[in-house]
Image (cartoon, rainbow, N blue to C red):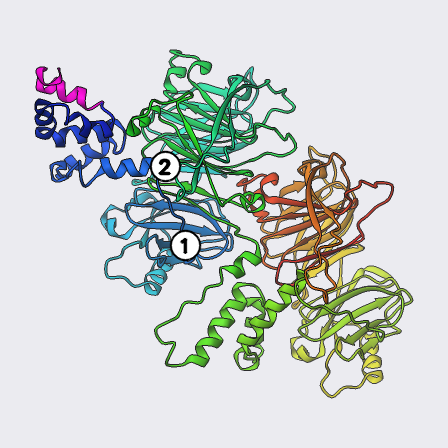
Amino acid sequence: MLHLLLTEMAIHIASYLPLQSLYQASLVSREWHSLIADNEQTLYRNAAILHRFVLHADLEAESSSQTSDKKRDWKQLCLCRRRLEIEKGWRGKAPSTTKELTATGEYVLRIKVDENEGFVITTHHSGGLYVTDINTDRVLWAETTHVPGYVHCEYDRGYIVFNRHNNSKEVWRLARRFQHSDIPDNSRPNGSMITASHEAARRYPSSTGRGHFRPWALIQMPEHTSNFRLSYPTLILASKNNAYVWDVPTSRLVETISNIQGGDQHGSLGCLNYVDVNDKYAFVCGSLQLRIFRRNGGGLVYKLTKKMLPRTQWDVLQESNNVACLSSLFQPQQLHEALHRSKSKSSASSFKAAHVSSSGKDLVALTASGNFIWIPGFERLINREATLSEIAVVLNFSPFPDNSQDISIYLALGELNEKAAIATRKGIYIINLDPEISKCTAEAPSRPGASVCRVMKYDNSLYLSLITCLQMSDTGIFFNWHPFLEQSRLSRFHIPRPDWFTSNPSMTRQTLYRNAAILHRFVLHADLERESSCHMPDKKQIDWTQFCRRQLEIERGWRGKGRSTAKELTAAGKFVVQMIVDEHEGFVITTSYNGGLYVTDINTDRVLWADASHVPGYVLWAYDHGYLVRNRHNNSALKEVWRLARDFQDADIPDNSKKPDDYMIAASHEAARCYPSSTGHGHFRPWALLRLPEGNWVFHISYPTLIAVTQNNAYLWDVPTSRRVQTIVNIQARNQDGPPGEFNSVDVNDKYVFLCGFHQLRIFARDGGALVYHLTTKMLPRTRWDVLPASSNVACSSSLFQPQQLHAKVHAHRSVLKAVRVSSSGNDMVVITVSGNIVWILGFERLIHGKASLRETAIILNFNPFSDYSRDMSIYLALGGSNEKAAIAT
């Protein structure tokens, strides 16, 4: 009997009882009741440690900081009973809830959670870092101007680390733990960090400083690094061939691991996807191998390839009728043991991510094809005490494989209880890893010692594919949902009601709706600033309430849910070859096959201005923000620049050798004589004559930059000043995929140059002119969305736009590229192929920085579903001004 043993031995045995059984054991006899009641604190404390509800190291840290755990009521307050409900919730056997945090803003890229502090940290595609209270959904602190877009951040124990575009890493620390005397002398923050900190503190004043951060250090990297991970106190960063280990509190480089790409009999590491670290090992996850390096001078101690995985795997199958708790969002799944063929080298999937558990004992990895690998006690592999097939458990989330498309998106590991969460294109899943946890529910663990639940209500494959971050805390999971689609942004439309709303309601309504118009990109903020600088105050001229309502109707119209009309403009003449629209000015510009350039009023269908004799037929030209650039008919190396007469000041004409010549001035006088106007609406005047070093035919203007491409060079000009600002040479250089072919489309923004050839799309950095990314049709995912007519799907009878069906299908045909356009926000890129594919790449900078693969970011619509390749399908591509829409003609 238990009570007959020594007290210490009886307590030790009772600590292994399932939690529900402790109370039942106390009812067995008076002696057992007395034993358990007299040692209740010790028993429940030991049970909490045994089941890893708390880490023993954390309790030792509390003890060293003179925080005695005797003050805790281990039975009531903490952990055991509350933890039991949480554990049941993770398994779908207790209620769970969902909550949307809207204060974090739009376009969330990365998420970090600190439940102890009660806040969540987010970075964004468009820039900025926000710290938001989890309970009140209120921004505690934010840095909106200093943190650039597409920034990856890491957080642990009060330290934030995020990258800058110059490859250095900024370290910020929680203000409540900040001491100036502790700032490391060797990597002090620079002036821009300090200025940003003061500005953020001014905008978000707080007496307690909760959620506030202050700059701690600026770490300079020895070379360009693409992946990094913070596991307090260690930061690991990896370049192409080396890994660097830093101590964050002291900002010291403590170790360098060289030659992480070194080849062996199993091949190379492959493309670097993820890194992790603990106090003994560094984990480097490549596309072809997962490698483990020993810390403190040790070398490579273990490597894992897909060929080494056990062939016996556990297929995760949906169990539609298995609802353990009606108020739970987690649905238990079936696990079916199956034998899978080992894949050939050509079809083997790549590793996507790897994490080591907080205890340092277990290792998990995720492959792109949906294999989740759990290796409990992975050090046994390093010490050769066990084989991979003996200890590894492989869960297969793609039991019916579709080799055309990777399904894995993100992997997250829980903090304490060895749980994991993964996001795939088929759903979000919770994996309970530790077989000992089953003792909490007094159930024997079933093979394979893990259970899987699917998160219900989040099963839209398109929204799932757009997840950029998934985090798992002790009591919840956090992820971004439909971050790009405008319809979803409108449905989340939220206007906070400030305290001063009643004092000036009309001005408040104007301000709020104006901000809403900018948020939903009904207008561009840069356009409003430009109007303001031209003394055109937009608040007085626009009723923003009516403007937003009208824009919502326009959005419905674009989707075929509202009225639309057609109108023919006849004054533009016949044989139109090219046109550009300026709705802000209210005119359309056209050129004709037989010559002439016409500016026609959209509303009245009346020619405002024309140059009928000076412009020859088939002339190439471009227009943006009031500037019109066109080829000189007898010399393609000459570019004429014309500017809207209303914006024209003779004093502003560039004072250099690029002034307009007599030929342009004579044509201007003739056009003004033929089309007199007191206001000059739609009139143009000559601005400059640019002389390129060599002739060209492909050029494009994206204000204020003009890009002109010759056979082997690209020239960038600042149009207002008529200065050449950059030359990118050797753009036709061969790489591993060959030459790009003849360039047929170009584009430019403030950071990148886009050159579209028949065989490759190449992206060059504006800063330095280096090639940073290239795209070929062979790299495109084979799974595409066929666009099929839906004859009965008429959402609005008075609409000219008919919604189409989208059907996923695998295609093998490879085409050539035709055109490229970058969105006005600079976030997205659109490419069309000759055979009728439109490729929309969301957040293309993630490809450049190695943060995502093309399969994760690209959406491909196929307008040639019946594969008629006897002739080219695509004719023209156009991209919308502000609302991220595209139109194609086929």
Q: Which mark is residue 472?
A: none
The residue lying toward the viewer, choosing from 887 and 193, is 887
Is residue 12 shown in magenta? yes
Q: Tell me the SS state at disc 2.
A: loop
Q: Nearer the viewer, residue 386 or 157?
A: 386
Q: Is residue 840 left or right of residue 506?
A: right
Residue 241 in sight: no
Element assignment for label 1: loop
Tag 1 residue: 101
Q: Quadrant of residue 503?
A: bottom left
Q: Which amino acid type is shown beneath numbered disc 2?
A: Lys
Q: Is residue 544 left or right of residue 374?
A: right
- Can you name the residue that lies furthest to the top here? 385
Please rate how many residues cluster around mark 1, counting C-alpha atoms within 10 Å: few if below 14, some from 14 to 19, many from 20.
some
State the residue in front, 619 or 361: 361
Mark 2: few, some, or many residues within 10 Å (few <14, many ≥20)? many
Mark 2 touches mark 1? (CB < 8 Å): no
Above or below, comparing residue 569 to residue 293 in the picture: below
Name the N-terminal-most of marks 2 and 1.
2
- Is 444 on the left or on the right of 783, as rendered? left
Query: Who's the residue at 54% across and 75% down the image?
Result: 544
The residue under label 2 is 93
Residue sitting at 49 percent across and 34 percent down? 239
* Residue drawn at 68 percent across, 60 percent down: 795
> What are the residue bounds of the magenta stretch?
1-16
Q: CA distance from mark 2 to mark 1?
A: 25 Å
589 on left or right of 10: right
Residue 339's place in the image compared with 504, above or below, is above
Residue 384 is situated, as x and y percent measured from the top left of the image, at 40, 11
- Work out which residue is located at the far bottom of the displayed protein and give it: 678
